[in-house]
Amino acid sequence: MQSGRIGSHQLMNAHFDEKRFPVQAAEVIAKSGIHAPIFTLDSWGGYLIYRFYPERKLFVDDRHDLYGEQFLREYLTAIRLAPGWDRVLNEQHINWVLMPEGSSLANMLEVTRRWRVVYSDQLAILFEREEGEGSR
């Protein structure tokens, strides 16, 4: 089942508020051919899984009990820009990041030469790790 469909039959039509979920950024991702894991907010994970499963993978979603305490600590380290935030992205081989516009991590990646903005709108900003940097 994908996007509320089984085969060509639409079983449900979920509407997602574009002010709460990265709907436009998801359209860009859908057209981009990105298949590497995308680091994003856990609260956006369910929506993005709904949109993309099984074609695209996410780093985390809001099913916290599936991930374990250490994994969630690393996620929070990156989101909060705690010491070692960039180590987490490197060690997890993260090459794509989708964050809220104006968030701490988005602001840091915008001024970090290893990352480039692929898309942004009033809600979300999508980054790609530059070739040759980190863990490509």
Image (tube, rainbow, N blue to C red):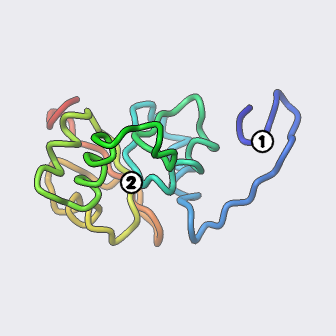
> Which residue ends up furthest to the left in the rendered image?
83
Q: x, y (%) of residue 29?
A: 50, 44
Q: Residue sitting at 16 percent across and 59 percent down?
A: 82
**Which label belongs to residue 4?**
1
For residue 59, side relative to residue 13 (left or right): left
**Picture coordinates of residue 67, whole percent (x, y):** 41, 38
User: Please, what secondary structure does the residue beneath circle 1 have?
Assistant: loop
Left or right of 38, for residue 19:
right
Q: Amino acid at mark 2?
A: Leu
Q: On the picture, is 67 further left or further right than 25?
A: left
Foreground mark, 2 or 1, reads: 1
Label 2 or label 1, whichever comes before in sequence order: 1
* Relative to 3, residue 103 above or below: below
Which residue position is annotated with label 2? 126
Residue 123, percent from left and from top: 47, 68
The structure residue drawn at horizontal position 56% and vertical position 68%, both measured from the top left corner, is 20
At a point 58% along the width and 71% down the height, the residue shown is: 19
Q: Label 1: how many residues lie within 10 Å, few (<14), some (14-19) or many (20+)?
A: some
Q: Which mark is residue 91?
A: none
Secondary structure of the residue carrying tag 2 is strand
When the figure is inspected, residue 38 is found, relative to residue 122, above or below; the finding is: above
Q: Nearer the viewer, residue 104 or 125?
A: 104
Other-residue count near label 2 (Cα within 10 Å), few / some / many at <14 / 14–19 / ≥20: many
Give the tally of numbered discs: 2
Q: Residue at x 11, y 55 (%)?
A: 83
Q: CA distance from mark 2 to mark 1?
A: 25 Å
Quarter of the figure that contains the C terminus: top left
Does 24 appear above or below 51?
Answer: below
The amino acid type found where label 1 is placed reads Gly
In the rendered image, which quarter contains the N terminus? Answer: top right
